[in-house]
Image (cartoon, grey):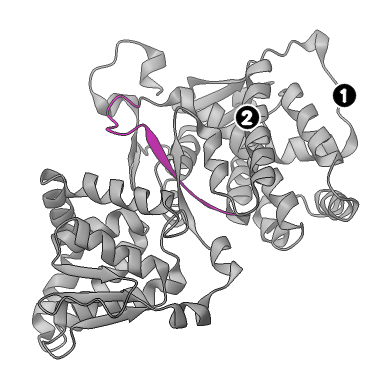
Amino acid sequence: MTLVVAALDCSVSVTALNRVVSKLLEDAFQDSPAGMEYLRRELSQHIQGWRSSACVRMLLAKATTTWRRLEQEGHHWPGFIPANDETELHEFLVWLITGDDHDRSFKTGSSDVFCFAALLEEIGMELFTTHDQTQMEPHLLCVSFSEELAARRRTERNAGERWGMRIPLDSMEECMSLWPGDQGFRNDLRGIFADAMHQLSEDETRARFTFAHGRPYYRIETGYVPERRKRLAGTENRAATMFLPKHAYRSASYFGKLISRWPEADLIKFETQLRHDPNAERMDSFHGLLSRETFAKLQGFLMGFYYALLYPLLNTDCLLTREAFGCWGYCDVGFLKRIASVIDRSRSNQAIGGDWTSFRRSDVLGLAAYMLAGAELETVDRTTSTASIGVLAKLSVLTGTCLGAVDSFRIAGR
């Protein structure tokens, strides 16, 4: 199980890992309900134990490197294995753990399941993976990739249902290279992401840690002075109000120009949505509203802005590899909803922030965990208390005071 958990840790989300392991153990212990009841009750501790064992043996690091290499070589799509492959992943693991000597081969049409098997082979499982079904190792369990099975399931839809993207911290715009589309389209997305980061810098936008009424907040400040207040156009103003902190005028202006270049049909739908239903809780109505290309540009701009805003708050000295995990997906309405919800809640902090936007620390922790630590939205939604000090996900996001002694208020706010 140590090898299985190490492989799952780098290829599926935290929730999916718990779900897959639980279902696998239920099948393995179906003849021993008492044993299964004990395992179910202590499942989280068992998973953490197997994960810790894999970490000590450097299996986690090797598994992560292998999964990333298989992605870079084009053997599987970027991100976590999607939910619609979990059934076949479960069938494979049941075959692997409970199979008999008369059933020594497993065929799959899923590139993800095949790569998962190759990953297990790489980190020490006695398996043999092949694309050529005539090449078998009689003394080993064999996993083969079937083009016939793959043809039945091949669909462009799979590319849009993946979450869990790697974010290289030294060149965060490269995460847009994972987007489906041709090279020219991905170049455009990288440019939009980088421009959003640059506009934030031009606005001198930064998050400053502060306390108000005994509670921790982050005040989002810019280089704005009242004498240079700018008036934004209608759509530009409504979009900035929904997705950006106050007084980020250069960012809002760039955002407006980006929107103005959208196809007319998308522009009309977007303007209508902002005018008549600008509620973050009803953001699900954005699903299918815009073309995928337009939605990608909208998401790319907001990602560039908020990655640039959050990154200076992080202490990344403890990372072995300078990369983070974003739990967003392609054209992800959930990402837009998360941003709009944080902005929406900041309005209730108006008395605290004065002329600035103020985010609760729990919102900043949750957003950082979602965008940089691979935390799923369900996990982030539980981080609502002002007493929250961290989020545990693929990576851990903790307040600065949890990491040891601090010698300044600024470091305490990281």
Residue 195 in view, yes or no: yes
Mark 2, other Cα within 10 Å: few <14 / some 14–19 / many ≥20: many
Residue 343 in view, yes or no: no
- Decide which of 389, 367 is in the foreground and name it: 367
Residue pictured at 75% horizontal, 35% vertical: 240
| Residue 105 locus on image (x, y percent) | 23, 82
| Residue 51 locus on image (x, y percent) | 18, 53
- Decide which of 308, 150 is in the foreground and name it: 150
Q: Is residue 233 magenta?
A: no
Give how far apart the Cα atoms at labels 2 and 1 are.
Answer: 25 Å
Residue pictured at 60% horizontal, 34% vertical: 304
Q: Quadrant of residue 410?
A: top left
Q: Is 5 rendered above or below residue 386?
A: below
Q: Amino acid at mark 1?
A: Arg
| Residue 211 locus on image (x, y percent) | 47, 21
Q: Which residues are magenta?
A: 316-330
Taking the image as shown, residue 7 lies to the left or right of residue 347, namely left
Q: Is 27 rendered above or below residue 391?
A: below
Q: Nearer the viewer, mark 2 or mark 1?
A: 2
Q: Specify the label residue 194 is tagged with.
A: 2
Residue pictured at 43% horizontal, 60% vertical: 76
Q: Which residue is mark 1?
A: 231
Q: Specify the label residue 359 is tagged with.
A: none
Taking the image as shown, residue 269 lies to the left or right of residue 376, namely right
Instruction: Identify the element where label 2 is drawn.
Output: helix
- Decide which of 230, 21 is in the foreground and name it: 21
Q: Amino acid at mark 2?
A: Ala
